Amino acid sequence: MKPLPESAREFILQTSGSYKVIRERVEMRWGRRVSKGTLSYYRGARSGRSRMARFDAVSPADWDWLVGLYYADGSKFKDKWKHVVVFSLSKSDELAIAKLLKILRTLELRPSILTNQNTVP
């Protein structure tokens, strides 16, 4: 099925009223039946769908350090729902881990630590 035309999406976003009324108006005007889930998606706030980092909160030196660490020991993955950035560090890199967590929290991101027991010493 083709996506809704841009004019229909704008109409959904700007029209006030119940979902039932909006669904009826979209069907009359564009000849398309839309679900409540589709209406909810187009009317919903986008703030909960992604987390923007506060790049202005971190110093240029810390940003450069983070980018260097990413180039050296980082990788990224994308699954169906989210993007994940992974830094592969040794447990003995305690100072680097502490600095990394501090920078990520300054960026207002929610870092987590996963350890792997199957590493080669």
Image (cartoon, rainbow, N blue to C red):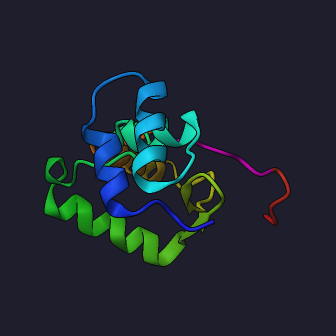
Q: Nearer the viewer, residue 113 or 81?
A: 81
Q: Nearer the viewer, residue 46 or 21?
A: 21
Segment colored magenta: 111-116
Q: Nearer the viewer, residue 85 or 19?
A: 19
Residue at 61% from the left image edge and 66% from the top image edge: 77
Q: Position of residue 36 (x, y in %)?
A: 55, 33
Viewer can see residue 101: no
Relative to 79, is 72 on the left or the right? left
- Locate the C terminus by quadrant: bottom right
Give the quarter of the image for residue 60: bottom left
Q: Residue furthest front?
A: 28
Give the quarter of the image for residue 65: bottom left
In the image, residue 45 sits, relative to residue 103, either above or below, namely above
Q: Nearer the viewer, residue 44 or 105?
A: 44
- Locate the N terminus by quadrant: bottom right
Q: Residue furthest top?
A: 18
Residue at 60% from the left image edge and 64% from the top image edge: 78
